[in-house]
Image (tube, helix red, strand yellow):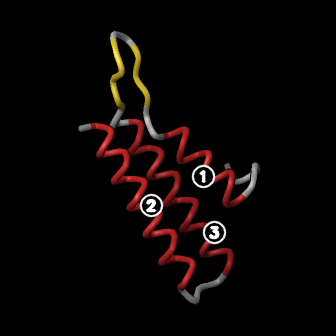
Amino acid sequence: MQFLNSLGLMALLAILYGSLLRRLISESLRNLVIGILFGGAAAMAVFQPVYLGSGVLVDARNLIVGCAAAFFGPVDA
C-alpha cells in the first residue's frame, strides 16, 4: 500500500508541474513555486516509506530529487 501512495504522490507532482508550465507567470516565480513543490513532495515522501524487509526501507525521495535534477539541473537538485 505504501508503494501506491508514493506512486500517487509522483503522479500528483507531475500533474502540478505540467499545470505550472502552462501558466503565464514570471520565470523566477515559476522556479520558486516548482522548487517548493518538489521540496514538499520530497518531504512528504520521507513520511511514506516502503518497507522491503527487516530493517530495509525505501522512500520516493531519491526519485523526486532525481527528477528535479533531470528537469532543472544539478544546482537545483
Looking at the image, tell me whether mark 3 or mark 1 is earlier in sequence order.
Answer: 3
Residue 68 position in % (x across, y down):
62, 54
| Front residue of this view, candidates 29 and 75 | 75
Drawn side of residue 22 relative to residue 11, left or right: right
Q: Report which residue position mark 1 lands on.
A: 67
> The N terminus lies in which quarter of the figure?
top left
Image quadrant in which you'd find residue 45:
top left
Marks 3 and 1 sit apart, C-alpha to C-alpha, by: 15 Å
Looking at the image, tell me whether mark 1 or mark 2 is earlier in sequence order.
Answer: 2
Q: Residue at x 28, y 37 (%)?
A: 2
Looking at the image, tell me whether mark 3 or mark 2 is earlier in sequence order.
Answer: 2
Q: Report which residue position mark 3 lands on.
A: 31
Residue type beneath disc 2: Leu
Q: Residue at x 30, y 46 (%)?
A: 5
Residue 47 position in % (x across, y down):
35, 36
Drawn side of residue 21 relative to residue 41, left or right: right
Identify the mark at residue 13; answer none if there is no mark: 2
Marks 3 and 2 sit apart, C-alpha to C-alpha, by: 14 Å
Against 10, is 15 above or below?
below
Using a 10 Å C-alpha cutoff, classify the residue at mark 1 as few (fewer than 14 neighbours), some (14 to 19) or many (20 or more): some
Q: In the displayed image of the protein, which residue is found farthest to the bottom?
A: 24
Residue type beneath disc 1: Cys
Q: Are marks 1 and 2 in contact (CB under 8 Å)?
A: yes
Q: Residue at x 70, y 60 (%)?
A: 72
Q: Please tell me whether mark 3 or mark 2 is closer to you in this view.
A: 2
